[in-house]
């Protein structure tokens, strides 16, 4: 059974599905008082799936991701898994931000060590993990290099290796390729999908790029500019996918039309 078929078959009662329910977030903004950013959001992240959050700039995608990561406290709402309330601490997630956020005064390997130490991974495991995940992103020979010597794409690969090295259940990625040139971004998307397949991970991915969301995802949640989640759409296209696959372009057009009607109207 394919991964997308597994996702399609998963239901609310699937024990390991992370279920966000009625997530509301208000921010206080100078001169505007309390502003609603997330409006009663429901979201299911099925284990092993690749899920994207798609929406225009400022619609609340990062805020929602940060709620899952525990970086933002929601005003109200619940996270449940297996019929129980869970907190971000129960989830074990690794985060890849839009920028690599590497420590420039530490080598590539030391950047990963720093994350392992922060997560209390025993020191005896550090070398093995650093080697495994740098190898996975093709940067083993750069372990002793400093970030300033790396290209933007290489730095983002290190950030991905750093997030993977803590061996999280779920990888949270917030527009991780948006600051890269399209050729590098395209290569990294393909590498990410290979890693996702090999590691059997769950990925929650934020993007405002419909093509990227279709290429990567099993299913996509679509948000509008007032912080509402207005649709969940499956992407039932055989993997491995290709950028020039007509099925990808067709699904992209369908979602674009739906998105445009909702967001513009
Ligand atoms: N700490 C904060 N305090 C007040 N307002 C905030 C805070 N963080 C985000 N916001 C506001 O919340 C709204 C949603 O922001 P968020 O970053 O979640 O959106 P986004 O969809 O990820 O945007 P982008 O795609 O541009 O990154 C925006 O109006 C933003 O200005």
Image: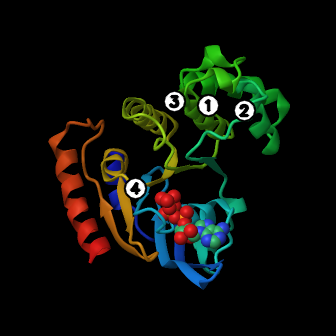
User: Closer to the observer: label 2 or label 3?
Assistant: 3
Q: Residue placed at 46% from the left, 68% from the top? A: 59
- Asked whether the residues under the numbered discs 2 and 3 touch, taking CB atoms below 8 Å apart as contact, a structural biologist would say no
Q: Is residue 3 left or right of residue 45?
A: left
Position of residue 258 measured from the top left corner of the image (x, y, whole percent) = 23, 67
Camera sees residue 35: yes
Residue at disc 4, secondary structure: loop
> Which mark sits nearer the N-terminus, 4 or 3?
3
Q: Nearer the viewer, residue 203 or 145?
A: 145
> Which mark sits nearer the N-terminus, 2 or 3?
2
User: Closer to the observer: label 4 or label 1?
Assistant: 4
Q: Residue placed at 67% from the left, 26% from the top? A: 147
Please say which color scheme the image uses: rainbow
According to the picture, the residue beneath numbered tag 3 turns out to be 153
Q: Is residue 165 left or right of residue 117?
A: left
> Label 3 vs label 1: CA separation?
9 Å
Residue 75 image label: none
Camera sees residue 86: no
According to the picture, the residue beneath numbered tag 4 turns out to be 208
> Which mark sits nearer the N-terminus, 2 or 4?
2
> Which mark sits nearer the N-terminus, 1 or 2?
2
Q: Residues within 10 Å of mark 3 (few under 14, many from 20)?
A: some
Q: Residues within 10 Å of mark 1 (few under 14, many from 20)?
A: many
Residue at disc 2, secondary structure: helix
**Residue located farthest toward the bottom when viewing the structure as drawn:** 33
Position of residue 101 measured from the top left corner of the image (x, y, whole percent) = 66, 41
Q: Residue placed at 56% from the left, 34% from the top? A: 156
Q: Nearer the viewer, residue 95 or 27?
A: 27
According to the picture, the residue beneath numbered tag 2 turns out to be 112
According to the picture, the residue beneath numbered tag 1 turns out to be 158
Q: Nearer the viewer, residue 228 or 89?
A: 228
> Which mark sits nearer the N-terminus, 4 or 1?
1
């Amino acid at each position: 059974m394919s991964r997308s078929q597994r996702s399609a078959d998963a239901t609310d009662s699937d024990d390991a599905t992370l279920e966000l329910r009625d997530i509301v977030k208000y921010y206080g903004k100078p001169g505007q008082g309390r502003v609603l950013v997330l409006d009663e959001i429901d979201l299911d992240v099925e284990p092993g799936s690749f899920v994207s959050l798609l929406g225009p700039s400022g619609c609340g995608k990062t805020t929602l991701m940060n709620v899952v990561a525990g970086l933002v406290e929601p005003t109200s709402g619940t996270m449940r898994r297996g019929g129980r309330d869970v907190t971000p601490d129960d989830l074990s997630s690794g985060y890849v931000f839009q920028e690599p956020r590497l420590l420039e005064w530490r080598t590539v390997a030391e950047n990963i060590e720093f994350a392992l130490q922060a997560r209390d991974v025993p020191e005896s495991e550090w070398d093995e993990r650093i080697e495994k995940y740098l190898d996975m992103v093709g940067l083993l020979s750069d372990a002793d290099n400093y970030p300033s010597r790396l290209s933007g794409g290489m730095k983002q690969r290190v950030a991905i290796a750093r997030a993977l090295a803590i061996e999280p259940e779920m990888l949270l990625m917030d527009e991780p390729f948006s600051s890269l040139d399209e050729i590098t971004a395209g290569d990294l998307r393909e590498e990410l999908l290979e890693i996702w397949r090999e590691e059997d991970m769950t990925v929650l991915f934020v993007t405002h790029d419909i093509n990227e969301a279709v290429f990567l995802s099993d299913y996509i949640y679509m948000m509008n500019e007032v912080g509402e989640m207005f649709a969940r759409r499956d992407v039932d296209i055989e993997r491995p996918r290709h950028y020039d696959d007509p099925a990808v372009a067709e699904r992209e057009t369908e979602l674009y039309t739906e998105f445009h009607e909702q967001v513009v109207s």
